Image (tube, rainbow, N blue to C red):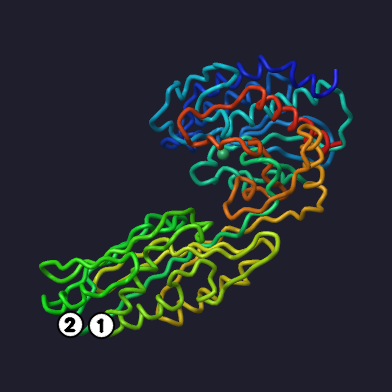
Amino acid sequence: MDLNTLVLSKQGRLLACLQENIRIPSVEGPAEEGAPYGIHCRCSLDHVLAAADAMGFKTCNVDGHVGWCEYGEGDEMVAVLGHLDVVPAGDGWSFDPWGGEIKDGKIFGRGTMDDKGPSIAALFALEALRDSGLPLKRRVRLIFGCNEETGATDVHYYLEHGGEVPVMGFTPDAEYPIINGEKGIINGYCSRSFTQTGDLKLVSLKGGIASNVVPEYAKAELACNAELAARLAEKSFEKVTFTVTDTGLTVEAFGENAHGSLPWLGENAIGRLVLALKELPFEGELAGILSFLAEKLGMDTVGKAAGIHLHDEISGDLSFNWGVMTADEHHLELVINYRYPVTFDYADCGPAFQTLFEANGFTVRQVHKEKLYIPADSDLVKTLLKVYKEHTGIDGKPICIGGGTYAKCLPNILAFGPIFPGDEAREHKPDEFMEIPKLMKNAQIIAGAMYEMAK
Ligand SMILES: [Zn+2]
């Protein structure tokens, strides 16, 4: 039997195994001995490793953080990285999220697409590869993570505790055809204290909900006498409103929501608010700070005003999102999320950002998540695209994204599958499901990719 037929012959067992695992609600829970992400994540891992053991594969449980199973011989190892933890069910389901129900050729439940379905498909793909007897030069390892959704400390633990690094591999936890570039992501946390003098004072300011979301609303409370409040309330700025209060003025700015990796698709309410506040008669250090923020951040989405703009052909512009701002009478904090193109490094933008804010009296802390880039002409990208074409007939082009996938956690791997172009991404939504033919197509592609990487 050829490899594809062998994979298909396992459909019944694959679905039964996936159903059993869907019934374990492996949302992160309180840590326990041997279960760092809660008992359900541990049970889900134990279940898959027991299935792998029953197939005759060597298995290893790395203290409940990750587990792996392996087939083959050789000094080098190639890997498929999946995860067994899931996000909470949430509302709006018409099926039992923990049921694994099969209806109309689909399997429903939390994790069917993200990422239990592809992970268990990989397990049966490995069994099919073993059964095929095809000769391999490298070992094939399936790594099952348990903390992708809430921090991805699982693979970090694996690497810290001597986990072998694959020579190449992929994670079926994003989409086809292949993601070969993911921008580097930096969160800049900037804070400073200030003094205020004069007739107009800032009492509080709040805008934004998270660093990676373009803020759609921001609001400032100002204190001043009634006469000044009435005068300022007559000013007019686009999508900014002034409301006179008992103690002064409320200023509200409105923007448009978008993902922080694509800030140009939104409108930044914090930037809009600060541009308006800069025009008001503040005095003291605050006046200077507002001018600085208006000039260097404002409504900019590519970091040009801040002097850190970068661009490449492969992944486009550096993205720049002023995600959060809070302030009281004498202290303010900002969170800025910026992402640099894949052919650049932290050194090309991080230090300049740091210097700019420090020179203006801010304390700056930056948290950096390294970019990922495996060139389109590399063996790995060419191999995976060849397998993809064999199974779909489509000439796939590698893509670069601003978000980060699980691939960033482990060297030498990238994101490949499981969602086909044009299909709805149903992960994290109610009624998450996977069409059974597409689940099996994924298993075939994974088996073919494992063979091509290991042969
Ligand atoms: Zn996932």
Left or right of 24: which side holds 440? right
Left or right of 205: which side holds 62? right
Q: Quadrant of the N terminus?
A: top right
* In the depicted structure, whether residue 132 falls above or below residue 323: above
What is the x, y in percent for residue 18? Answer: 59, 22
Report the residue at 30% width, 75% height from top. Answer: 277
Left or right of 394: which side holds 217? left
Q: Quadrant of ligand 1?
A: top right
Residue 64 lies in what quarter of the image?
A: top right
Give the number of the disc on residue 281. 1
* In the depicted structure, whether residue 179 falls above or below residue 98: below
Label 2 CB, ligand 1: below 8 Å? Answer: no
What is the x, y in percent for residue 126? Answer: 75, 27
Taking depth in this image into account, of 274 and 110 the one nearest to the observer is: 274
What is the count of numbered marks? 2
What is the x, y in percent for residue 75? Answer: 83, 41
Label 1 CB, ligand 1: below 8 Å? Answer: no
Judged from the image, the secondary structure of the residue bearing numbered disc 2 is loop
Judged from the image, the secondary structure of the residue bearing numbered disc 1 is loop
- Type of amino acid at the residue the image marks with label 2: Asp
Report the residue at 73% width, 32% height from top. Answer: 446
Give the number of the disc on residue 199. 2
* In the depicted structure, whether residue 85 falls above or below residue 102: below
In three-dimensional space, the C-alpha distance between marks 1 and 2, rounded to whole angstroms, equals 8 Å
Crowding near pointer 2: few (<14 within 10 Å), some, many (20+)?
few
What is the x, y in percent for residue 69? Answer: 69, 31
Kindly indicate whether the residue at mark 2 contacts the one at mark 1 (C-beta within 8 angstroms): yes
